[in-house]
Amino acid sequence: MRKLLVVVVVLIVMFTIGSQDLAAQDSTGAFQVLKEKFIEGDWRFMSLVLVCLILGLAFAIERIITLNIATTNTDRLLNNIDAKLAEGDLEGAMEVAKSTPGPTASIMYEGLRNAKDGPEAVEKAIVSYGSVQMGLLEKGLIWISLFIAIAPMLGFMGTVIGMIQAFDRIQATSSLSPSVVAGGIKVALLTTVFGLIVAIILQIFYNYIVSKIDGIVNRMEDASIGLVDIMARNNVFKS
């Protein structure tokens, strides 16, 4: 939670500083156009869409940082554990797993901790603790998917309200002049566009995170199988 708050604060500061720098460097360029369209799109809905973007990016960046930290060189870890078990040092192998960060090392530690109860106990511990680690890896994904769904919905809400405003103006003036309805239609289109852009950005991050988790899970499964083989080869279950 603390890491997430830090990421949110950093993103807000980056948006603020970045917007000031862009405004100072280019008062008539892309940033100014973006700012004008943001205001024209009705700031009440556009601000909500921006909040979805900031919070969604905060959860995504926090997950990416956590998953990068959780990525372990499983081959090196297995070799270190194999070397300790070859020496008959089960406690040393457990210490190697315990001192290595990441879910793979945690699962191996649980397997080694139950080594004296036989291979069935090791496999059961690996499966059980693997489910726990899987849940930890997927922590926060539900919030990213929520913001992916909410951002375009807020945009569509702005679209509906913009169209209602356009029809209200038609009713008030009894005229179908383009200038009467242009404002409401512009709000409708801009809120939809910004909501879809936010959803697309967050969807890219979401898919990257899911693929990262899948890679970690595959390495966890391979390492778990390798650990059981190493333990059997070094006669850990017979001790």
Image: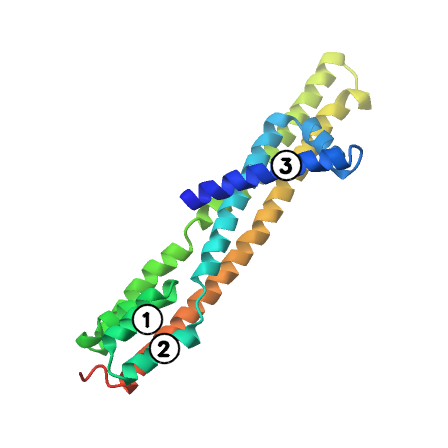
Q: Residue drawn 29% across and 69% down? A: 95
Answer whether labels 2 and 1 touch (C-beta < 8 Å): yes
Choose the circle earlier in sequence order: 1 or 3: 3
Determine the secondary structure under disc 3: helix
**Amino acid carrying mark 1 in the image:** Val
Q: Kindly identify which residue carries mark 3.
A: 17
Marks 1 and 3, how far apart at CA: 44 Å
Quadrant in the picture for residue 218: bottom left
Where is residue 178? Give x, y as percent.
81, 24
Residue 210 image label: none
Camera-side residue of 26 and 183? 26
Query: Horizontally, is 3 left or right of 12 in the view?
Result: left
At 68% from the left edge and 34% from the top edge, which residue is drawn? 20
Instruction: Describe residue 33's horizontal placement relative to residue 84 as left or right.
Output: right
Q: Nearer the viewer, residue 142 or 182?
A: 142
Residue assigned mark 2 = 80
Determine the residue positioned at 42% across, 66% down.
217
Q: Earlier in the sequence, mark 3 or mark 2?
A: 3
Q: Give neighbour class at mark 2: few <14, some 14-19, many 20+ (Cα, 10 Å).
A: some
Q: Which residue is mark 1?
A: 96
Quarter of the image containing the C terminus? Answer: bottom left
Q: Position of residue 131 (x, y in %)?
A: 33, 61
- The amino acid type of the residue labelled 2 equals Asn
